[in-house]
Image (cartoon, coloured by chain):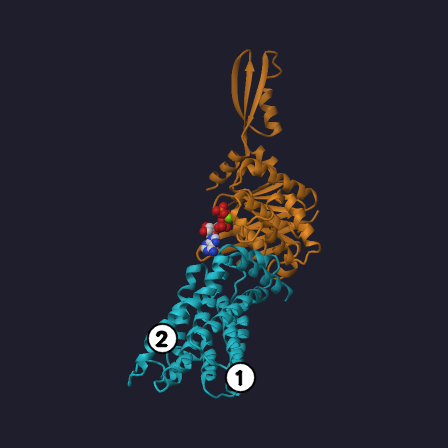
Chain colours: A cyan, B orange
């Protein structure tokens, strides 16, 4: 565990040293959300027209409906970025030989995985805070403080799960290029099956079930609940537990699949 | 004296490609042991097997009487490994790289030890610079420092002097000598045949096969010596074996002739002898 913190600290020093990368990974989601906002500004009036079947937002509440759509999208952005960034950085450790060197110097696989998670902890926290602040400001969301806290916690937990997923995927990649096939494999189905675009409960049963494989699904379940006018915490404790379980499961899986030797 | 490394009947193949073929060798404790072979000989593969970074097909390896795979955590505390590629964090300084790898070993006075090793590898004045701005030779030295930080009993160095200029190469070997004198066993691979002279013992590897295990002196003796005898300005050349007895018997032919003014011996250098061995056994 001490070693995990040592590795985490090293990752943080590296992240802090790379100002451009840091700025990009914090600002990119903000820009995307801003783009979303200007697109929404032209779409929302159209929602007043009856029978617009293409919009995932329920037509009966045109303006107030935005959180239901915006929140899953922002969750998706954080999920995607953390996943890809972490996977690529860890693959770099493999190709540059530092992973092997860490292992031979006595760092254990679980320490490395936890270390990376700790390293990204700060970045994920910052990302979650910035994204939520921007959304509340841009879309003038009117949430209770407790809702905002939960909101933050979901996005943050999702970022951690994404980091774990990135680590897990990286164990199958011999070089950076190998990460890319996983993007359509994991990220795109997430868009369709987990509630970013449409309510997954209305999909065919098999697709609905498939959606349960992706962590974004549980994050979105919570987010959707939060946007309901009235909800009870018990409605999403299950989803929270699953997300935490997901993170732990990935930690175990990744420490099995991380190859120590050729 | 006991052996630090013992390899018996080691085999490794990648698919149909047999990379190590029945390799046997013993490294005496405290020796500078050279693993010499051309590109693709299997040097890196063999070193990785020794440090437990590679699963081999059959055979037995013992390093400091431990199995590199079964006892890896015990072993890793006691060995140092310098990979062929620098394997450093370019976005960290030399100091940060060395202390990061040192921390895994829970070294006391890490800062002091890191500074000591920086001085030993002649890096003190650049210790706070990012490694990515270092020249190739300097990166090799940082990599060496990372290998030595925890004072291992045995170090495995994979081509530490490849692409290093002659002066630095000499200084690097001087460091190896110092380490060896302090009791560290050094297992070093190289494709530079002349470095064989600097080792206590060498193994010549080609296409996964051990061609020869011997001391550099005995290898030199396998070469030829050109003897040039100058008798009153007339030079006669003969080619002889390099052993002392072979040279003596050649010279006997001349007796102790008063007219002989000087005799020159030109010995094959070790590079040519090894190249010969590598070529002949094809
Ligand atoms: N992961 C791998 N998969 C397939 N073949 C491999 C792998 N690693 C090494 N080889 C093969 O094993 C042989 C020996 O490689 P190795 O890297 O051990 O040689 P080397 O003596 O270190 O060469 P060099 O001097 O170029 O570093 C080569 O033919 C190489 O192609
Ligand atoms: Mg090699």
Return the residue nearer the eye: B36 or B161: B161
Give the percent coordinates (x, y) of residue B70.
Answer: 61, 62
Give the percent coordinates (x, y) of residue B16.
Answer: 44, 56
Disc 2 secondary structure class? helix
Marks 1/2: CA distance? Answer: 31 Å
Residue at image mark 2: A40
N-terminal label among 1 and 2: 2
Relative placement, left or right, of B160 versus A175 is: right
Return the residue nearer the eye: B83 or B259: B83
Q: For residue B203, what is the image quadrant?
A: top right
Quadrant of the rendering where the N terminus of chain A is positioned: bottom right
Can see residue B207?
no
Crowd tier of the residue under label 2, counting other residues whose Cα lies within 10 Å: few below 14, some 14–19, many 20 or above: some
Q: Are labels 1 and 2 assigned to the same chain?
A: yes
Ligand 1 within 8 Å of disc 2? The answer is no
Residue mark closest to the camera, 1 vs 2:
2
Can see residue A249?
yes
How many numbered dots are placed on residues in this image? 2
From what the image shows, is residue A22 above or below residue B176?
Answer: below
Relative placement, left or right, of A166 versus B98 is: left
Crowd tier of the residue under label 1, counting other residues whose Cα lies within 10 Å: few below 14, some 14–19, many 20 or above: few
Disc 1 secondary structure class? helix
Relative placement, left or right, of A1 versus B23 is: right
Q: For residue A260, what is the image quadrant?
A: bottom right
Give the percent coordinates (x, y) of residue B64.
Answer: 66, 54
Residue at image mark 1: A237
Q: Mark 2 falls within which chain?
A: A
Give the percent coordinates (x, y) of residue B68.
Answer: 61, 58
């Amino acid at each position: 565990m001490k070693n995990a913190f040592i590795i985490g600290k090293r990752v943080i020093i590296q992240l802090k040293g790379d100002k451009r990368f840091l700025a990009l990974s914090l600002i990119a989601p903000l820009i995307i959300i801003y783009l979303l906002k200007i697109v929404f500004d032209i779409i929302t009036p159209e929602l007043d027209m009856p029978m617009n079947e293409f919009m995932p937002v329920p037509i009966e509440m045109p303006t107030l409906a935005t959180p239901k759509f915006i929140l899953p999208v922002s969750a998706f952005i954080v999920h995607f970025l953390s996943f890809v960034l972490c996977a690529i950085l860890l693959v770099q450790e493999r190709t540059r030989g530092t992973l092997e060197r860490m292992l031979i110097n006595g760092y254990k696989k679980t320490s490395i995985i936890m270390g990376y998670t700790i390293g990204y902890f700060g970045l994920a926290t910052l990302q979650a805070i910035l994204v939520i602040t921007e959304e509340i400001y841009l879309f003038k969301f009117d949430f209770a403080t407790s809702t905002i806290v939960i909101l933050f916690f979901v996005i943050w937990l999702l970022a951690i799960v994404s980091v774990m997923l990135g680590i897990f995927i990286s164990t199958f990649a011999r070089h950076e290029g190998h990460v890319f096939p996983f993007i359509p494999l994991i990220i795109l189905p997430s868009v369709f099956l987990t509630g970013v675009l449409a309510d997954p409960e209305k999909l065919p049963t098999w697709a609905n079930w498939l959606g349960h494989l992706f962590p974004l699904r549980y994050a979105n379940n919570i987010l959707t609940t939060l946007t309901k006018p009235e909800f009870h915490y018990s409605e999403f404790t299950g989803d929270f537990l699953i997300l935490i379980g997901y993170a732990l499961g990935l930690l175990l899986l990744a420490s099995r699949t991380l190859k120590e030797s050729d | 004296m006991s052996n630090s490394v013992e390899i018996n009947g080691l085999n490794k193949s990648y698919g149909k490609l047999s990379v190590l073929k029945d390799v046997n060798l013993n490294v005496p404790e405290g020796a500078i042991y050279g693993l010499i072979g051309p590109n693709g000989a299997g040097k890196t593969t063999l070193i990785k097997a020794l440090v437990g970074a590679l699963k081999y097909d059959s055979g037995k390896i013992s390093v400091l009487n431990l199995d590199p795979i079964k006892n890896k955590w015990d072993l890793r505390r006691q060995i140092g490994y310098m990979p062929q590629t620098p394997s450093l964090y370019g976005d960290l300084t030399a100091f940060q790289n060395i202390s990061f790898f040192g921390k895994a070993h829970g070294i006391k006075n890490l800062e002091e030890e890191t500074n000591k090793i920086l001085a030993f590898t002649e890096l003190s004045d650049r210790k706070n610079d990012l490694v990515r701005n270092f020249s190739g030779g300097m990166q090799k030295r940082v990599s060496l420092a990372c290998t030595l930080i925890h004072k291992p009993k045995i170090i495995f160095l994979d081509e530490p002097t490849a692409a290093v200029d002659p002066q630095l190469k000499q200084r690097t070997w001087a460091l190896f000598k110092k380490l060896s004198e302090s009791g560290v066993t050094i297992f070093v691979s190289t494709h530079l045949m002349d470095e064989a002279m600097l080792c206590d013992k060498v193994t010549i590897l080609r296409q996964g096969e051990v061609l020869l295990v011997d001391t550099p002196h005995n290898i030199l003796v396998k070469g030829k010596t050109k003897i040039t005898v100058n008798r009153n300005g007339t030079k006669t050349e003969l080619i002889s074996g390099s052993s002392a007895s072979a040279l003596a018997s050649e010279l006997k032919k001349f007796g102790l002739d008063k007219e002989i003014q000087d005799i020159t011996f030109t010995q094959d250098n070790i590079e040519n002898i090894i190249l010969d061995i590598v070529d002949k056994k094809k």
